[in-house]
Image (cartoon, rainbow, N blue to C red):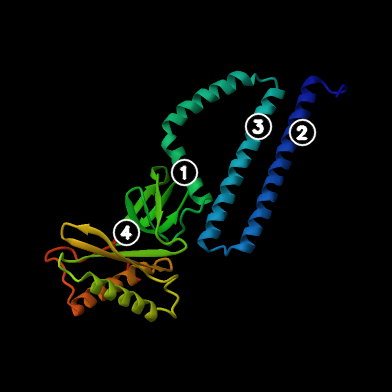
């Protein structure tokens, strides 16, 4: 630009940088808008998966815009003759100091991004995270909100989640173990268990609660109180709690009616926590 003074050339260059940043911002939002439109076509917007996808699109858009305009700002300063080296070094030192102070918050947001992108759990799932268990009420980038069976509301920072256990993803399973007396008739106990499992399957064959046939494991352990007989049923997500309670009730009734003895004072049936009423 030989006809313009030096400051004029720099001003034009800064304007071009700003124009490029505007075009890049528009292009980013257009691409994310197309992506969001496809997601809305594939997922109901009010569904947990739709809300998760909307959150991810929003986060990606905000991050992309910040990066674009930060690069444009630094470039404009360099064109204007401002030494950006010391500025970047100062910003780096300040960023390190800020990072030490906000490392837990950054960890929570990064962990939340992975929770959402990997679809580890959805709103309504029964999960166990960071030592607490309950039904997921809300998921954000920073935290996961759980409602326990007793009504307690737990807010768990996503950065504290090392292992997440989801009991309502794909299918659920209820394992029931019954401890019998040492002199109990094991063959009769196994026959009762098979009959009870088959009866439960027949009663719920048409309501879609069960995802597969029940399994009788037989005597899978010997405890100080006596031999232990186990069985399990596979159910649709969330139904394992109610059907597990019914299975335990039928087993205890069946053992009593068949005269199968159980040790006095020993817990007659064991399984995972009963969970919410369904």
Q: Report whether 154 appears left or right of 226.
A: right
The residue drawn where x is 43% and y is 34% is 103
Q: CA distance from mark 4 to mark 2?
A: 56 Å
What crowding class fits label 3: few (fewer than 14 Cα within 10 Å), some (14-19), or many (20 or more)? few
* Residue 275 percent across, percent down from the top left: 31, 64
Q: Report whether 25 appears left or right of 189.
A: right
Q: Reading the chain from its start, which is encountered first: label 1 or label 3?
A: 3
Q: Reading the chain from its start, which is encountered first: label 4 or label 2?
A: 2
The residue drawn where x is 65% and y is 19% is 83
Of the pair 203 and 237, the residue shown nearer to us: 203
* Residue 29 percent across, percent down from the top left: 67, 48
Residue hosting label 3: 71
Q: CA distance from mark 1 to mark 3?
A: 26 Å
Q: Reading the chain from its start, which is encountered first: label 1 or label 2?
A: 2
Q: Reading the chain from its start, which is encountered first: label 3 or label 4?
A: 3
Q: Do tag 1 and tag 4 residues touch (Cβ < 8 Å)?
A: no
Q: Reading the chain from its start, which is encountered first: label 1 or label 4?
A: 1
Residue hosting label 4: 148
Residue at the right extreme, as displayed: 3
Q: Is residue 1 above or below residue 212?
A: above
Residue hosting label 2: 16
Tell us which disc is closer to us: 4 or 2.
4
SS under mark 4 = loop
Residue hosting label 1: 111
């Amino acid at each position: 630009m030989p006809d313009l003074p030096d400051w004029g050339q720099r001003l034009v260059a800064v304007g071009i940088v700003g124009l490029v940043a505007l075009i890049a911002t528009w292009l980013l939002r257009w691409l994310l808008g197309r992506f969001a439109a496809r997601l809305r076509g594939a997922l109901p917007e009010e569904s947990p998966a739709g809300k998760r996808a909307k959150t991810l699109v929003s986060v990606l858009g905000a991050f992309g815009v910040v990066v674009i305009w930060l690069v444009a700002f630094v470039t404009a300063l360099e064109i204007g003759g401002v030494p950006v080296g010391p500025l970047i070094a100062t910003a780096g030192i300040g960023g390190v100091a800020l990072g030490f102070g906000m490392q837990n918050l950054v960890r929570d947001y990064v962990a939340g991004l992975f929770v959402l992108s990997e679809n580890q759990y959805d709103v309504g799932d029964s999960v166990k995270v960071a030592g607490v268990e309950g039904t997921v009420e809300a998921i954000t980038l920073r935290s996961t909100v759980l409602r326990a069976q007793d009504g307690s509301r737990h807010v768990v920072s996503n950065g504290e989640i090392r292992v997440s256990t989801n009991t309502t993803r794909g299918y659920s399973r209820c394992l029931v173990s019954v401890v019998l007396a040492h002199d109990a008739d094991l063959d009769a106990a196994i026959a009762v268990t098979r009959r009870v499992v088959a009866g439960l399957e027949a009663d719920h064959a048409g309501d879609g609660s069960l995802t597969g046939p029940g399994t009788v494991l037989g005597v899978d352990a010997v405890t100080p109180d006596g031999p232990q007989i186990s069985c399990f049923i596979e159910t649709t997500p969330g139904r394992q709690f109610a059907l597990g309670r019914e299975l335990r009730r039928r087993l205890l009734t069946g053992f009593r009616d068949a005269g199968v003895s159980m040790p006095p004072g020993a817990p007659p049936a064991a399984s995972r926590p009963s969970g919410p009423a369904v």
